[in-house]
Amino acid sequence: MAEMIPSNLDRVRRSTAPEVNDEIDRQIERNIRLLAQKPPAVLDARIRDLELEWDIERVLEAMAASFAFVGTLLGAFVNPWFLLLPAVVTAFLFLHATGGWCPPLPILRRMGKRTRNEIDVEKFAIKAIRGDFNDLNFHSDQQLFINRVIDAVRAYRA
């Protein structure tokens, strides 16, 4: 059974259209290149923003909980047919938990919702640019350093 359930690391990316994954990846690279020339305070602020960014799992959980709660209340106080809503939502959650896909996923991904891994790739690239990993000794040529950071990000995604 464990072989049938994809790992958490890439199950959302495997369930996402390649062109959507590519656009998310290109946006991460654009963000990194743009921030490479910014002062440390801007880098610090972006890292804080990334640490607060809701990943796709959290968005799906919040949506599911909201719909299930509303459906339960409507089913209890308005019409029992509304209890179908939490039943459908829990089926979606099960699909997502076991296969990494559920009906809202393609919509959320097209809206740019990222996995925790995708958020972390950007965050750690910015930390490298900021100098958190100075022992890499790539700072003699800033453009070479930025290209190596981008290459590391690409390799990490592969």
Image: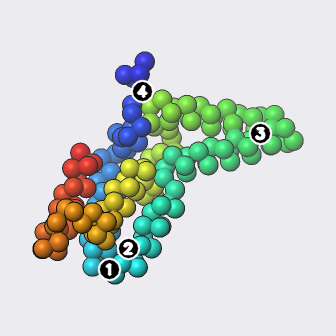
Q: Residue at x 80, y 38 (%)?
A: 75
* Residue mark closest to the camera, 4 vs 2: 2
Q: Is any part of residue 27 visible from this angle?
A: no
- On residue 72, which mark appears? 3
Amino acid of disc 1? Lys
Residue 94 position within the rendered picture, expressed as x and y whole percent measured from the top left: 55, 31
- Left or right of 4, for residue 96: right
- On residue 43, which mark appears? 2
- On residue 5, which mark appears? 4
* Residue mark closest to the camera, 4 vs 1: 1
Amino acid of disc 3? Thr
The Cα atoms of the two marked residues, 3 and 1, are separated by: 49 Å
Q: Which residue was labeled with disc 1?
A: 38
Dot 1: within a 10 Å radius of its alpha carbon, few (fewer than 14), some, or many (20 or more) residues? few
Write down the quadrant of residue 81 in the picture: top right
Q: Residue at x 19, y 62 (%)?
A: 136
Q: Earlier in the sequence, mark 1 or mark 2?
A: 1
Residue 153 sits above or below residue 130 on the image: above
| Furthest-right residue in this view | 77
Residue contact between numbered discs 1 and 2, judged by CB atoms under 8 Å: yes
Dot 4: within a 10 Å radius of its alpha carbon, few (fewer than 14), some, or many (20 or more) residues? few
